[in-house]
Amino acid sequence: MPDQPAKVTFTDPTGDGRPITLDTVVVPRTEVRDYEQRINKIPEPDPHYVDVGMLYRFAQVEKIRREEPEGTVPLHLAVRGHMGTGKDHDIEQFAALLRLPYYRIPLTGEVRDITLIGSVKLYGDGLGGTESRWEDGDITRALRGTALVNLSELNAAGAETLFALHGLLDRYAALDLPTGETVPLRDDVRLFGTMNPTDLRDYAGTQTLNKAFADRWVIWEKDFPDISEIEAMLDRRYPSMRDVYVRHISRLATEINRSFLSTDPGTRVETPISLRTVLDRLPVGLMVYERWEDPLRTAWEAMVLPHIDAYDIDHYETVWAACVRKGPSDPPFGG
């Protein structure tokens, strides 16, 4: 008996939009050669994930795509934001909820078009000689079946990589392989991308996107979460964390990231506090130093300060003094 789609509902965190209910995707058993491998690439939903609005925006486009008549050109969605804002995690969780096999393909400056598209390679023929065979690259392999493809770090890719993808992303909607084969963009494939902002920050290898390439995407900005959103994330992931620690961590992260975005050189810092620091490193530090006199301060020194540029330390400490001064002495968890 074939798998049957389930239902998944996306809600607007702002309360302005109506809930959107979509059928999950069913990977066809008979249409793909790598069915078992593809099924294993469906990510699991993160029980601690908090949608601050990006999944609802993805769902809005997905709903229109499914409802509009055939022939509508699909929109490809890219998320632009600073490090640690959760861009890739948003896309992965959208794939998880829709039950789509997830292919994250980093487009670093070292990646070449033959890595992504494929190339002819030589293999032994078992008779002492060799024979040439075409081997799919990362993107071609993903396009062969149901998939959500996340082209991560779009603005770190080389020009030859971007030009190789132009036909896939416009009305032609296909890749032409050197073998003469054309691989069309299937109806059950979704193309996403992520990128860092192009400014004076230390995002080595990034560049301004070629305008023709950028025009093939809908680009949405992903901001740092605000204090209430960080509190919600911490509450969900660490329900036993005491409220005073949740408040302090949330305020510290919010104030530091506000300084990171500042245009005032007197208050601007060059290193933000990422969600990895907020949701992983600092809570682990609290667990390690829970019996110390000031667990939060000790975790701050061990898990945060080593990750920042030396010239940012003074401002980090200024924010600490304004937001916390002296951390609570109560155990961070329980009670």
Image: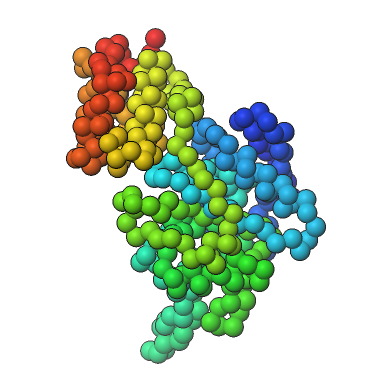
Q: How many marks?
A: 0
Q: Which of the 4 image quadrants contains residue 285? A: top left
Q: Is residue 204 visible?
A: yes
Where on the picture, by quarter, is residue 37?
bottom right
Whether residue 241 is situated above or below residue 68 in the rendered picture: above
Residue at the spot x=34%, y=60% of the render?
Answer: 205
Residue 66 x, y percent position in the rendering: 74, 51
Colour style of the rendered protein structure: rainbow
The quarter in which the C terminus is drawn is top left
Give percent across and percent down for residue 253.
Answer: 37, 30
Query: In the visual, does 242 lie left or right of 47?
Result: left
- Residue at (26% x, 31% y) in the render: 316
Q: Position of residue 174 (x, y in %)?
A: 62, 71
In the rendered image of this protein, does residue 140 appear above or below residue 246?
below
Q: Residue at x 23, y 27 (%)?
A: 317
Query: Is 165 placed above or below 8 here?
Result: below
Q: Residue furthest right?
A: 69
- In front here: 317 or 27? 317
* Percent position of residue 278, x then y: 37, 31
Above-or-below relation of 20 to 282: below
- Name which residue lies at 21% across and 32% down: 314
Q: Is residue 140 visible?
A: no
Along the line of sight, the residue nearer the viewer: 251 or 315: 315
Quadrant in which residue 268 is drawn: top left
